[in-house]
Image (cartoon, rainbow, N blue to C red):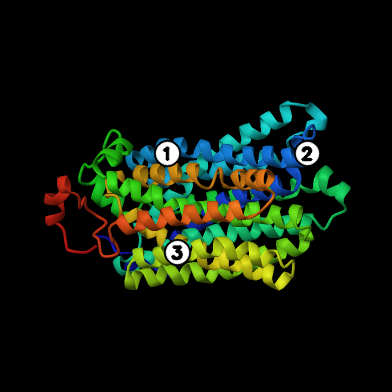
Amino acid sequence: MTDITAHDSRSRLRVILAASIGSALEWYDFFLYGTAAALVFGELFFPKSDPVVGTLLAFLTFGVGFVVRPLGGVLFGILGDRLGRKPVLVATLLMIGVGTTLIGVLPTYSQIGIWAPILLVAMRVVQGLGAGAEYGGAVIYLVENAPPQRRGFWGSFAPLGVSVGNLLAAAAFALVTMLPREDLMSWGWRLPFLASFLLILVGIYVRMKVAETPVYTEAVVARGKIEKNPAVEALKRHPRNFLVVLGSRLGENGLGYLFPVFGLSYCITTLGIPKSEALSALMLAFGVELFTIVGFASLSDRIGRRPVYMFGALFGIFWAFAFFWLVGTKEWIWIAVAFIGARAIVTAAMFGPQAAYFAELFPPQRRFAGFAFARELGSLLAGGPAPFVAAALVAAFGSWWPVACYAALLAALTVIAIWFGPETYEENITVDNTADGALNAAAMPARA
């Protein structure tokens, strides 16, 4: 088996950059859209509605991207298992980046009427199809290149890219919100979307320079393990692992979007906190998260994926209420603590080990399709509707308590999923360790 430790430092850096820059672009785009939905899209694309309804509609279009993500996960996941990881990673990066860049040139409702939100949704669909397999592909590329005892650490560079993307998106909007309101609403909001084109160029260049993963080349292609429909096989042969991925996504993805996207809107719209203060607190949280993601992922290499993931979900139940108590003080320091707890502890403790964990749950010939399909179904159920559901609950009840209970429920469901899930950090990821693949596993080294 080819060992990444035998590669020179330049090859290692190229592997890390190839995976993490795509994750950064994906989540820069998705969080950028969420921030714009919270701050400007309601007025720009749904001006016939009152402010509350306009925000709800903007969050609803935010969820459209998640509706098509499972489709993208299945489609590109199958291609990733049949054609290889590298070509799919190039294709998904292009789709996400192009969709985001085009949002930056869309005319608004005042210019073309109903076609404005229609085109916005269309670009969101393009984003969602690419994003459905982008993160899964990036994770698999890292994990399949990693030393066996450090898959958690290596896998963490994909979620690290997510945090970098979130941080860049928050910073971009923090800068443009400093413009006079008239300039922000006329042209300033477009700049962060147009800037994603630079990330596309860098990402494509880096990804074209890397090789296919050694696991895919040796364990799938060389052994003739390519399957006609790996997504169906993953669902049929690994139902428990499929459901574990689905359930464990509810808390991580739901809270991961609810706190920064809805939480940002809640702080600004409901509590009247200045945009600059709310965004700076969120940016600080994303900055701290850069370190805690790697820390939690590395810890999972030592004690296992499940205990670290479980801690994050359990802490999320408590923080679902603490978050609103803290932001309710309207004091910047406590607002920052609220976002740091939500992102750098709750999300990071689940997101850090998740990369390696999900990849280890499926054998190499079904890994891309199984990972991407199950993960994005979880996104559809959790992350996509979370901001919309939260905004609707506040509008209906006039209080944050129903939102906190909703967040706690998502985290509790993840606790249950992790409880029934297997531990995987010592698994051999080059073989099929399920019953039908046991003969192949017996013929391979104990760990790889």
Which residue lies under the disc numbered 2?
44
Tell me if I can see residue 228 in this picture. Answer: yes
User: Which amino acid does the dot numbered 2 rest on?
Assistant: Leu
How dense is the environment of label 2, judged by Cα within 10 Å: few (below 14), some, or many (20 and up)? many
Disc 1 designates what residue? 76
Query: For the residues marked 1 and 3, what is the alpha-carbon distance in whole angstroms?
Result: 33 Å
In the rendered image of this protein, does residue 378 appear above or below residue 112?
A: below
The reply to whether the C-beta atoms of the residues labelled 2 and 3 are less than 8 Å apart is no
Q: Please state which of the two labelled residues, at mark 1 or mark 3, is closer to the viewer.
A: 3
Tell me if 220 is positioned left or right of 407 in this view: left
- Crowdedness of circle 3 by 10 Å Cα count: few (<14), some, many (20+)? some
Q: Which of the 4 image quarters holds residue 428?
A: bottom left
Could you say where residue 15 lies in the image, as x and y percent from the top left? 44, 59
- Report the residue at 43% width, 40% height from top: 73
Q: In the shown orientation, is residue 32 left or right of residue 296? A: right
In-front residue for pair 322/152: 322
What's the residue at 52%, 51% (across, down)?
A: 254
Quarter placement of the C terminus? bottom left
Where is residue 442 drawn, in percent x and y? 12, 56
Most foreground residue, 279 or 188: 279
Q: Residue at x 65, y 56 (%)?
A: 263
Give the Cα separation between the discs numbered 2 and 1.
33 Å
C-alpha span from label 2 to label 3: 39 Å
The quarter holding residue 331 reads bottom right
Residue named by callout 3:
314
Left of 215 or right of it: where is 36?
right
Local crowd size for mark 1, using a 10 Å CA cut-off: few (<14), some (14–19), many (≥20): many
